[in-house]
Amino acid sequence: RPTGSEQKVPYTGVADEIKSTNPDHIGGYEVAIPILTGIETKFGLSLPRFQAAPRPQQLK
């Protein structure tokens, strides 16, 4: 195998180091992270990472 192709994958669930900490990311996104990471690793891709824009503070 090529160097760097080995990746630690948990037996069940999502690895803590790639698990999303954003409370808005539930269900599908949590499942998609390891799938997309695996695709990047297998095919040598670098998919863009997006972050949500900060929410404006509401005035009281």
Image (cartoon, rainbow, N blue to C red):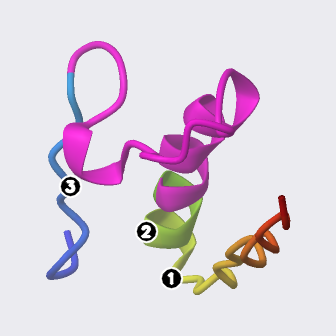
Q: In the picture shown, does residue 18 fall above or below 3?
A: above
User: Circle 3 is placed at which residue position?
Assistant: 7
User: Circle 1 is placed at which residue position?
Assistant: 44
The reply to whether callout 1 and callout 2 are in contact (CB within 8 Å) is yes
For the C terminus, the quadrant is bottom right
Pointer 1 or 3: first along the chain: 3
Under circle 2, the secondary element is: helix
Asked whether 12 or 41 is in front, the reply is: 12
Magenta residues (range): 11-37
Under circle 1, the secondary element is: loop
Residue depicted at x 46% and y 46%: 20
The label shown at residue 41 is 2
Q: Which amino acid, by three-letter code, is at mark 3? A: Gln
Q: In the picture shown, does residue 17 fall above or below 11?
A: below
Q: Quadrant of residue 59?
A: bottom right
Q: Which amino acid, by three-letter code, is at mark 1? A: Gly
25 horizontally vs 7: left or right: right
Residue depicted at x 21% and y 27%: 10
Instruction: Check disc 1: other Cα within 10 Å, few if <14, some if 14-19, many if 20+.
Output: few
Q: Which amino acid, by three-letter code, is at mark 2? A: Thr
Residue 17 is situated, as x and y percent measured from the top left of the image, at: 23, 51
